[in-house]
Image: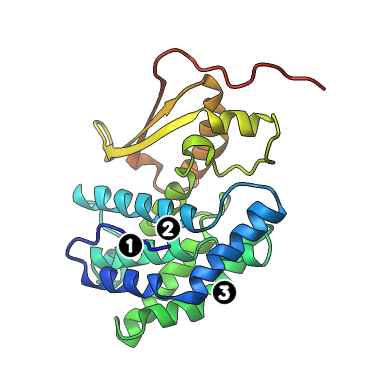
Amino acid sequence: MNLNLPVGENAKLKELLARVNAHTRLQTYWQCSNVIAVDRLGINDHGPVHIKIVCHMALKLLRLLVEQGISPSVERDYGLTAHDAEVVVVLAGCLHDIGHIVHRDGHEQFSAALAPPLIAELLEGLYDERERAIITSETLHAIIAHDTPVRPLTLEAGVLKVADALDMEQGRARIPFRKGSLSIHAVSALAIEKVQVRKGDERPVCIEITMSNSAGIFQLDNLLKPKLLHSGIPEYFEIRAQITGEEKKIVTRYEL
């Protein structure tokens, strides 16, 4: 899978994406993650498509925040730039779920353990030694902090956590659910039709969610809400969810 993102004038991000797209081991890790998640556990996608969606969402969220004067942590704490913050969120997005190649349980810790040699390869020649150390530190923090209970300490980590929760369109919700089960997880996931991110009216970012059925509220309350509240940056977001048109019937019959 080629990871295509709007790099703009960020030359380092452009080169990073070229390296990611040519990196056989990382691409294979994404495939292996889906063998574990989808084929063996019967849960939803944690492979290439999820990575692409999360990277797009994270980059968009970060840029909306920066455009409205909110400084990334690498800029505030280390004197780097917003372009370097984009490298952090995309790199963390690419690596945050590779721990699934070991197991679903504890995958955040496995991802952080597997990431350092990949980070070193992907950043070689892009930064000097000090900057590589900083980018590595910030990327690993974002990876480990995408776990819901872990508190992010940087803007970049908070952005990744929220972006991870926004991969929920058309049954792609991040709450794992057994294929074919008529659980509230499956039903509510199928109720999410569209997720859009734009500049907010009252806060920096507005997340608009279109649902076909009110069951989708379960996804928002049990997936998005906890991630947002534990993101370290909930004050920057407004959430709007609505059902458009006639409410769609998802389940017609249920038997035990």
- Mark 3 lies on a secondary structure that is helix
- Label 3 vs label 2: CA separation? 18 Å
CB contact under 8 Å: marks 1 and 3:
no
Q: Where is residue 122 in the image (x, y as percent from the top left)?
A: 39, 78
The reply to whether residue 7 is visible in this rendering is yes
Q: Which of 230 and 101 is in front in this view?
A: 101
Question: Can you name the residue that lies furthest to the right here?
Answer: 256
Residue on which the image places disc 2 = 157
Amino acid residing under circle 1: Ser
Q: Position of residue 27 (x, y in %)?
A: 49, 69
CB contact under 8 Å: marks 2 and 1:
yes
Q: Which of 1 and 128 is in front in this view?
A: 1
- Work out whether mark 2 precedes mark 1 in sequence or the reverse, and give the earlier one: 1
**Circle number at residue 114:** 3
Q: Where is residue 61 in the image (x, y as percent from the top left)?
A: 32, 48
Residue on which the image places disc 1 = 73
- Work out whether mark 3 precedes mark 2 in sequence or the reverse, and give the earlier one: 3
- Mark 2 lies on a secondary structure that is helix
- The local crowd at label 2, few if under 14, some if 14 to 19, many if 20 or more residues have their Cα within 10 Å, is many
Amino acid residing under circle 2: Ala
Viewer-nearest of discs 1 and 3: 3
Viewer-nearest of discs 2 and 1: 2
- Label 2 vs label 1: CA separation? 9 Å
In this image, 102 relative to 217: left or right?
A: right
